[in-house]
């Protein structure tokens, strides 16, 4: 693709292009932040009107049974399962990714306490999304059993970090900042060979890259629905547990929704037989119901086509930035190699924050992550090749003109 006309041609022949019609995209915007907050599905307006007006308004308490509210976390879990290579009855959509990390980590440590009680190390990456590291720290502090966190970084490769003291390895499939993607099957096999269990955070992976938790033989997986799955701001997350672990233990947030028969109102906790034991309390039905609108679009897409287009958009973006913005202090953070790349491209600029604010002011929405990183999400369901072309032209203009130096672009907001 050498010209904008080439990009328009590629958009015309894009097999995913029709799916864009299922989203409500504001005119005049190039949205490259679907890895942080996905776009509004068109179906969500009617769905929310039905949930609020008919199910809540008219149905009231009856809707727990008549509108399928009670079954919703598991029914949506079955749909989500198809996007991550899991089977029916293995996933629930519930709570937040952080909470689900807590549950998965607690269950994994319980399993290891029986299988290999001497193991006291939880391995993650220094570069992992902070909430993952914070939840590990909170768990260690809560348990008071001598657990420690060990972080993989430039000085400590994964191979070296995985020794016989490791109970659990907790990694993100795609790194939120760099866009680096792990080979889930290979890394899980390495963890298992050392006797560790593998928990995968799929927040930047599900819906964006092919994921196969079963094929990778993973132990637990969690992720959110508001990024590439377009579930809405703060929409409930999900948790998958490998069937081999689902009956052994239960997680400590053992609220009544995870009980085998919650309406027995029994004094003693008895965990539900399957994945439902990973529920805690009453679900946020309005938000949960809307998750289905985004999931249905992702399920209608051919994941092989999504991956192919995501990589093509990334290749185009990287090449155009290097050609058009040459001479500016930009450094590519994301791996070029397809096998190592997720679905966003990150670029460093010493004044990254201000450059991103100037881009946003001109209708190109990406985001900024410390330190100095401009993040551009490439969401094949609604982003086209010509969008990428236009975005790079705006970036070039912002850099060439020095527009980012205007003082208002350096003012920090609460959310970057
Ligand atoms: C976005 C993201 C989260 C978010 O967790 P919440 O509890 O939903 O706020 C967690 N982990 C990773 C890797 C993420 O990218």
Image: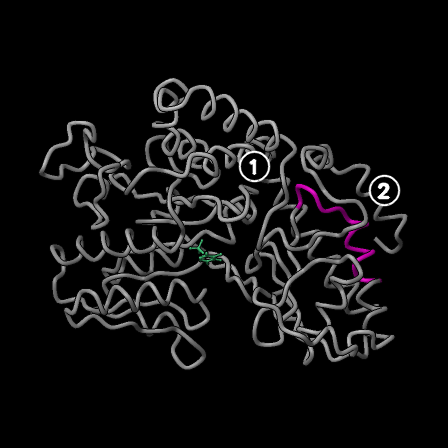
Residue 354 image point, x, y percent: 71, 74
Above-or-below relation of 74 to 346: above
Residue that numbered label 1 is attached to: 294
Between 2 and 179, which is closer to the camera in this rendering? 179
Count the labels in the image: 2
Residue at the extreme left of the image, as rendered: 268
* Between marks 2 and 1 in the image, the one whose residue lies nearer the viewer: 1
Q: CA distance from mark 2 to mark 1?
A: 27 Å
- Residue 109 as seen in the image, left or right of residue 50: left
Q: Residue at x 55, y 60 (%)?
A: 340
Q: Residue at x 38, y 78 (%)?
A: 156
Magenta portion: prevailing SS class: helix
- Circle 2: element type: helix
Q: Residue 260 has which mark?
A: none
Q: Check the image and tell me how it is coloured.
A: one colour
- Circle 1: element type: helix
Residue that numbered label 2 is attached to: 9
Between 192 and 349, which is closer to the camera in this rendering? 349
Tell me the quarter of the picture where residue 296 sits: top right
Residue 109 image point, x, y percent: 21, 58
Above-or-below relation of 196 to 121: above
Quadrant into which the C terminus falls: bottom right
Q: Which residues are magenta?
A: 380-393
């Amino acid at each position: 693709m050498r010209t904008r006309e080439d990009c328009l041609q590629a958009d015309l022949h894009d097999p995913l292009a029709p799916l864009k019609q299922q989203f409500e995209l504001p005119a005049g915007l190039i949205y490259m932040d679907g890895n942080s907050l996905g776009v509004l599905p068109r179906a969500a307006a009617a769905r929310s009107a039905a949930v609020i007006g008919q199910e809540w308004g008219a149905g009231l308490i009856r809707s727990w049974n008549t509108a399928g509210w009670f079954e919703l976390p598991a029914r949506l879990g079955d749909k989500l399962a198809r996007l991550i290579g899991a089977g029916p009855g293995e996933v629930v959509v519930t709570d937040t990714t952080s909470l689900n990390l807590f549950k998965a980590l607690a269950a994994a440590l319980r399993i290891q306490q029986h299988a290999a009680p001497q193991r006291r190390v939880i391995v993650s990456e220094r570069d992992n999304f902070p909430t993952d590291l914070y939840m590990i720290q909170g768990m260690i502090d809560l348990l008071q059993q001598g657990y420690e966190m060990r972080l993989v970084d430039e000085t400590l490769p994964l191979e070296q970090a995985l020794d016989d003291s490791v109970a659990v390895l907790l990694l993100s499939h795609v790194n939120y900042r760099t866009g680096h993607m792990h080979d889930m099957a290979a890394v899980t096999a390495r963890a298992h060979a050392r006797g560790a269990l593998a928990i995968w955070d799929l927040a930047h992976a599900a819906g964006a890259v092919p994921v196969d938790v079963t094929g990778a033989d993973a132990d637990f997986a969690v992720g959110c629905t508001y990024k590439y799955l377009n579930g809405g701001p703060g929409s409930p997350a999900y948790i998958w547990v490998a069937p081999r672990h689902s009956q052994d233990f239960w997680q400590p947030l053992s609220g009544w929704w995870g009980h085998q028969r919650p309406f027995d109102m029994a004094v003693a906790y008895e965990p539900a037989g399957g994945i439902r034991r990973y529920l805690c309390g009453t679900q946020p039905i309005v938000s949960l119901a809307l998750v289905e609108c985004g999931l249905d679009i992702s399920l209608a897409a051919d994941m092989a086509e999504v991956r192919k287009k995501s990589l093509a958009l990334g290749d185009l973006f990287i090449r155009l930035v290097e050609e058009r913005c040459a001479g500016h202090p930009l450094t590519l953070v994301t791996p070029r190699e397809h096998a190592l790349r997720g679905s966003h491209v990150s670029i460093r600029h010493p004044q990254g924050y201000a450059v991103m604010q100037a881009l946003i002011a001109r209708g190109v929405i990406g985001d900024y992550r410390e330190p100095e990183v401009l993040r551009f999400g490439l969401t094949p369901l609604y982003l086209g090749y010509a969008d990428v072309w236009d975005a790079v032209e705006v970036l070039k203009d912002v850099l060439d003109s020095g527009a980012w130096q205007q003082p208002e672009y350096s003012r920090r907001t609460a959310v970057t």
